[in-house]
Structure formats: C-alpha cells, structure tokens
C-alpha cells in the first residue's frame, strides 16, 4: 500500500505543473480613476476590444492566449471629457509559482509542458489600475490668431522648440 501511495504521489508531481495546480488562467484587475466615471476600453495584443466600461470597475482577463508560451498583453485606455487620456500597458509575466514552485514540485514537465499552455504560470502586471487623469492640454485650434496659455509641463517635448518667449 505504501508503494502504491508513493508511486501515486511521485506521478502526481511528475505530471503536473506547480503554477497549474495553485494558479488560475484568469486574473481580476480592479480599475479606478480620479475623477471617477471615466470611460475604459481594453484591447488585447491583437487589437481586439475585450472590454468597455466605466470606472470604478473590475474586469477578469485571461493571462494566456492558449498557445505555447502565449502570455497575453493588453492596453487599458481611460478617458473622460475635459481630461487627458491615459493608456496603461498590462503584460503577462512569469509568476513565483512557475519559477520556484516547479523547482520543488513540478519539475521539467511543469516548466516546459503544462504551465506554458495553461496560462496559470503568468501574473498580469500591474495587478491593479489606479489612474489620475490630468487636465487636458490646451490647444490653439482657433484661426483668429489667439494665444493659448499653458504650463510648460503640459507642452509636448517635440513642440517646445517652436515656443517663443514673450517677456
């Protein structure tokens, strides 16, 4: 009986990946903004829109595309009228259960077979989105020769060389 239990335990370790055992193929990301009630659009690495909503919210995203070593990546765009739009990249990265857990429990099969397919080996980073939307940069869109006054920090770097000092 001890040999049977030992063989079962050994085969369990050989044929499982540690991240696949303790991990999850999806991850829930809380998303908030200041000010709240901003629009959210999430697109994946293929350009496919996967979520549209309003802050604050939480969204559950897959960590893998299902292919071998297929970690997902997303771009979260947060926007609100009168405020600058923010784009935040979210990327899948190998987690500690995959890196260290397979060293102890999963072995080579966990590292190279099971975990790379399941998506459980990844953690989406950042794991929480908190965005402060800045005031929208003023633009001189008038054709009447008017002047816009903005803070230097709000002028894009590529336009600073075109600025003229007035005092």
Image: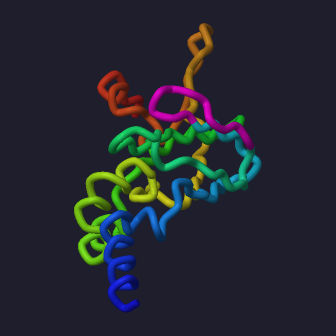
Outermost residue, bottom side: 2
Task: Classify residue 4 as left or right of residue 135.
Answer: left
Q: Position of residue 88 (x, y in %)?
A: 49, 45
Q: What segment carries the magenta color?
A: 43-53
Q: Position of residue 54 (x, y in %)?
A: 74, 45
Task: Classify residue 109 as left or right of residue 40.
Answer: left
Q: Is residue 37 above or below residue 22?
A: above
Magenta region, main secondary structure: strand
Question: Where's the C terminus, which quadrant?
Answer: top left
Q: Is residue 6 above or below residue 87?
A: below
The one nearer the camera, 6 or 124, is: 6
The picture quadrant where one finds residue 149 is top right
Residue 57 belongs to the span the image colors magenta? no
The picture quadrant where one finds residue 108 is bottom left
Question: Where's the N terminus, which quadrant?
Answer: bottom left
Q: Is residue 147 above or below residue 114?
A: above
The one nearer the camera, 31 or 96, is: 96
The one nearer the camera, 126 or 34, is: 126
Picture residue at 34% right of the left edge, 22% below the top: 162
Picture residue at 34% right of the left edge, 69% below the top: 96
Outermost residue, front side: 1
């Amino acid at each position: 009986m001890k040999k049977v239990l030992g063989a079962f335990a050994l085969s369990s370790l050989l044929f499982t990946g540690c991240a696949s055992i303790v991990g999850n193929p999806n991850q829930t990301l809380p998303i908030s903004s200041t000010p709240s009630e901003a629009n959210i659009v999430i697109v994946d690495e293929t350009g496919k829109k996967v979520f549209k909503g309003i802050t604050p919210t939480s969204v559950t995203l897959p960590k893998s595309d299902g292919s071998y070593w297929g970690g997902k990546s997303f771009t979260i765009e947060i926007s609100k009228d009168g405020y600058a739009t923010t784009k935040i990249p979210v990327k899948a990265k190998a987690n500690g259960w995959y890196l260290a857990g397979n060293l102890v429990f999963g072995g080579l099969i966990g590292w190279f077979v099971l975990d790379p397919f399941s998506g459980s080996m990844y953690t989406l980073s950042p794991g929480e989105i908190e965005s402060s939307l800045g005031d929208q940069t003023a633009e001189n869109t008038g054709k009447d020769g008017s002047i816009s006054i903005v803070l230097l920090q709000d002028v894009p770097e590529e336009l600073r060389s075109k600025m003229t000092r007035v005092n």
